[in-house]
Amino acid sequence: MINFEVKTYPESEKLKKENQLAWKIAEIASDKSRPGGEQIEMVINRIIDNAAVAIASFSRKPVISAREMALAHKRKNGATLFGVDKKVKVDCEWAAWANGTAVRELDYHDTFLAADYSHPGDNIPPILAVAQQTGCSGIDLIRGILTGYEVQVNLVKGICLHEHKIDHIAHLGPSVAAGIGTMLKLNTETIYQSIQQALHTTISTRQSRKGEISSWKAFAPAHAGKLAIEAVDRCMRGEGAPSPIYEGEDSVISRILSGPKKIYTIPLPEINEEKKAILETYTKEHSAEYQSQALIDLAKSMNKKIKNFDDIEKIEIHTSHHTHYVIGTGANDPQKMDPDASRETLDHSIMYIFAVALEDGSWHHINSYTSARAHKKSTIRIWQKIKTIEDSEWTKRYHDPDPRKKCFGGKVIIYFRDGSVLEEEKGVADAHPNGLRPFKRSNYIEKFKTLTGGLITKKESLKFLKLVQNLKSLKNKDLINLNCEIKSKKFSKNKKKFIF
């Protein structure tokens, strides 16, 4: 690995493109590195994971809207849509839009947290859609996905977007463009321009994850994937991009991030070095913001030690800066304490999540978010007693550069009316690679079967799982089948008139 320093330069210096971050990324995207066996197996795990959560969200309103928009753009040799008959194909950028929304809707797929946040699995829908439409093989797809993960993970390590209230999809646009470039075997120049265009068009603010969180939280990464596909297509036609996108006088760093005096350090693999970043990422056992995963496990454990929840006087969650300010009371979002808040808001409220998991001793991707569940009086009483506290030690552990020491949990102190105290802590979720029971292939398959049960046939399930586990040997005609059709052949269609 190398540590590449990035800063802004005055236009008079005419920074050579070979010394720009976008070019360095393009170089590793266009290199000849071969995927290792462990990385190939993890790509398969994440495709299974994505399919599971996409099928589970099939009937949710944002997913229906995205799918209907995509179905208005049919293409004979295009890409498929999750849950829909494989004979129906649409333009790949619209498949990326619909499938990306389905994958993101339940907030239930993989994550990587460092200087910033990310869901690297968001790379898969656009890269897979392009693979289906352009004649790529299974191994091509694997190489593209590994590049997507590599780029996004390393950008997240080096550049904090949240500090400036910029949404994390600004790292996703470049990673998707780079991944598609790898998969299509494009030259360095074309990928370089594509990365710059993709970044330029995918910058938005974090208001999508603040206050009354709307369905745009699910649409946002899908939109970034769609824009990245379009950026690559334009650059394949010889078009250019705003340049240098990171280092220019009016660039992203200069005007949107920390400004001309800031030097960012981005870790990148050497040219032709094996791309391993996917192995540093982790999926979710529970459908909620990743920083709540360990705390859900902790709540389930503490549930067994509480006889009467009405005896609780108050609950303190001592945790990292990120957890406190993003999903804790440090966010100062009254919606996070409101039973009438949207599901998207509740899954970003550790106060709500911990209260439900503590009272129920369990967590469910649907039942834990129903309106009736949020309005349960006993839950509200617990919920209102919870406060998060930023703890510098947990913040330090959150940012530890050693993946074996990095933590995303916290310490919980429950104070009872009789003066007694229950105190426990958990550093990482049980399903984390360093947790009590790290997710293996069998866990991904079990998650898939649980989330798709009753929605797809057993035959369809077995067919998909057999196919995806042979990914490296698949031909392009096989990639069309990396999808699952739901049982029902009739989808409710909105009868109102729209643009598409």
Image (cartoon, rainbow, N blue to C red):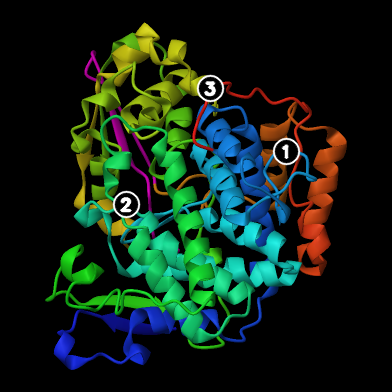
Query: Which residue sits at x=50%, y=55%?
Result: 226
Image position of 169 (left or right of 141): left
Is residue 139 something that shows in the picture? Answer: yes
Q: Which of marks 2 and 3 is in front?
A: 3
Q: How crowded is mark 3: few (under 14 residues within 10 Å), some or many (20 or more)?
A: few
Q: Does the magenta stretch include residue 420?
A: yes
Q: In this view, does 409 lie above or below 93?
A: above
Earlier along the polypeptide chain: callout 2 or callout 3? Answer: 2
Work out whether mark 3 precedes mark 1 in sequence or the reverse, and give the earlier one. 1
The residue labelled by disc 3 is 496
Counting from the top left corner in percent of width and height, residue 6 is at 27, 80
The residue pinned by badge 2 equals: 167
Mark 1 or mark 2: name the one nearer the start of the chain.
Answer: 1
Amino acid, disc 1: Val
Give percent across and percent down for residue 428: 44, 49
Reply above or below: 208 against 239: above
Residue at x 49%, y 36% (from the top left corner): 499
For label 1, the residue is: 84
Image quarter in which the N terminus is found: bottom left
**Spatial CA span between label 3 and label 1:** 21 Å
